Image: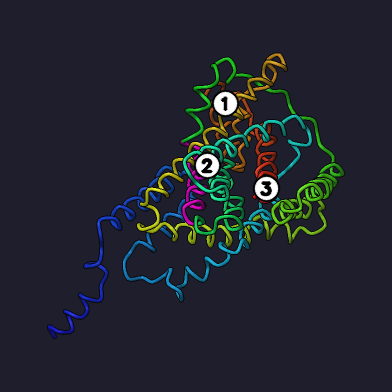
């Protein structure tokens, strides 16, 4: 009996737990707290955090060669999940605000400056160009784009970059509000924008077709992301395949989000995440995302001046492509300053422009490197 108990005790993972694993388990639990208690993007943060929890428990073998999560991770590594996420995003997104206010595409473009700022910073810190490009794309706050580009340019960095990108997407409600308030005045934050013009069904159907043709002709490397994004939007706006649109908006989106989130989290092992280079990547990712928000807001302030105070500069913060989280942040901050201020649809213009912008930026970086 004693030998049986000894063998059982030896087979547990308790004796194998190290200090670094305890640190990772604490980080995973902190993420779960933020998702469940504070409500910070739980659809993203819960799968990521639980993936971290599972993979840092000793003896599970989930990311071993024949482990469950390792098999699921193949779709992340081979760039299958990101275009599928873009299809679902397209099917869930109304491009009407962007069509009604084409100027908002400039805000989406301005917010991509963080990508190239971080790229230059990574090169100066000694990262090779391909790795620097993969680090820079975190600034777009677009997890699928970051995974897709990194899988092509720097697959060895896929784990830390995917984790950083998705973590910052989930933490948008924490990171963006202080930056917005610091860069804008109370008067600017209180600006009420006039209602957008109605957009016809014909315009909404033509838009994804035109964008697909123009963008992919210009940057063929962006086809997997832009093509799937616009395909998803077309099945939504056509109105003739409601079951396809409904499936993409709901079932498929949630399935891919669960698998992608838990496998991204499963790459956050102690030996990967607690390295100096990984911590540097996470720090550069934060810089990239912050600079993207800053550049979007600053360009929004320029548009505020040029419009004689008719454009609320806060909507520039939504130019990062974290849809719809960044738009919700702008709406929340706007209502805190003025309860009658409704900026959500105005912010969605730059927000969806940012999705297109980050995919185009990824295409440019693929062409360059």
Q: Mark 3 = which residue?
A: 368
Task: Give x and y (percent) for residue 230.
Answer: 75, 51
Q: CA distance from mark 2 to mark 1?
A: 37 Å
At x 57%, y 26%, the residue is 334
Q: Is residue 346 or residue 80 the one in the foreground? A: 80
Q: Which mark is residue 123?
A: 2
Which of the two discs, 2 and 1, sits closer to the camera? 2
Main SS of the magenta segment?
Answer: helix
The image quadrant that residue 344 belongs to is top right
Q: Is residue 258 or residue 59 the one in the foreground? A: 59
Q: Secondary structure at mark 2?
A: helix
Q: Secondary structure at mark 1?
A: helix
Q: Which class describes the residues within 10 Å of circle 2: few (<14), some (14-19), or many (20+)?
A: some
Q: CA distance from mark 3 to mark 2?
A: 15 Å
At x 74%, y 36%, the residue is 98
Which of the two discs, 1 and 3, sits closer to the camera? 3
Q: Is residue 245 left or right of residue 189?
A: right
Q: Mark 1 = which residue?
A: 334
Q: Which residues are magenta?
A: 159-174
Task: Give x and y (percent) for residue 180.
Answer: 53, 26
Total count of labels: 3
At x 37%, y 51%, the residue is 275
Q: Is residue 101 above or below residue 36?
A: above
The image quadrant where one finds the N terminus is bottom left
Q: Is residue 199 left or right of residue 91?
A: right
The image quadrant that residue 56 belongs to is bottom left
Q: Residue furthest left?
A: 2
Task: Give x and y (percent) for residue 341.
Answer: 61, 24
Q: Which class describes the residues within 10 Å of circle 1: few (<14), some (14-19), or many (20+)?
A: many
- Say which label, 1 or 3, has the lower sequence index: 1
């Amino acid at each position: 009996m004693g030998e049986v108990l000894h063998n059982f005790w030896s087979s547990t993972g308790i004796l194998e737990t190290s200090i670094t694993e305890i640190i990772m388990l604490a980080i995973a639990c902190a993420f779960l707290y933020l998702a469940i208690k504070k409500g910070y993007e739980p659809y993203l943060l819960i799968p990521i955090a639980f993936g971290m929890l599972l993979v840092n428990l000793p003896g599970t073998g989930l990311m071993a060669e024949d482990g469950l999560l390792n098999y699921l991770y193949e779709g992340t590594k081979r760039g299958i999940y990101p275009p599928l996420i873009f299809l679902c995003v397209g099917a869930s997104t109304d491009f009407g605000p962007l069509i009604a206010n084409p100027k908002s595409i400039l805000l989406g473009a301005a917010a991509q400056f963080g990508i190239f700022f971080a790229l230059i910073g990574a090169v100066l810190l000694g990262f090779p160009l391909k790795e620097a490009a993969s680090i820079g794309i975190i600034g777009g706050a677009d997890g699928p784009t970051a995974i897709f580009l990194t899988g092509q340019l720097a697959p060895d960095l896929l784990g830390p970059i995917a984790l950083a990108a998705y973590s910052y997407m989930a933490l948008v409600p924490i990171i963006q509000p202080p930056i917005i308030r610091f860069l804008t005045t109370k008067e600017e934050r209180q600006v009420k924008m006039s209602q957008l013009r109605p957009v016809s069904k014909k315009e909404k159907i033509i838009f994804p077709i035109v964008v697909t043709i123009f963008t992919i002709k210009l940057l063929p490397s962006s086809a997997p992301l832009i093509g799937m994004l616009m395909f998803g939007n077309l099945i939504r706006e056509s109105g003739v395949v409601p079951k396809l649109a409904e499936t993409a908006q709901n079932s498929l989106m949630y399935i891919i989000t669960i698998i992608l989130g838990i496998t991204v989290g499963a790459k956050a092992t102690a030996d990967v995440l607690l390295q100096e280079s990984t911590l540097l990547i996470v720090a550069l990712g934060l810089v990239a995302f912050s600079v993207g928000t800053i550049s979007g807001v600053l360009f929004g302030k320029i548009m505020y001046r040029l419009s004689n105070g008719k454009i609320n500069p806060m909507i520039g913060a939504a130019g990062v492509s974290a849809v719809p989280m960044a738009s919700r942040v702008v709406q929340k901050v706007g209502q805190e300053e003025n309860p009658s201020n409704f900026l959500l649809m105005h912010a969605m213009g730059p927000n969806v422009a940012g999705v297109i912008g980050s995919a185009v930026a990824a295409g440019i970086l693929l062409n360059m490197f």
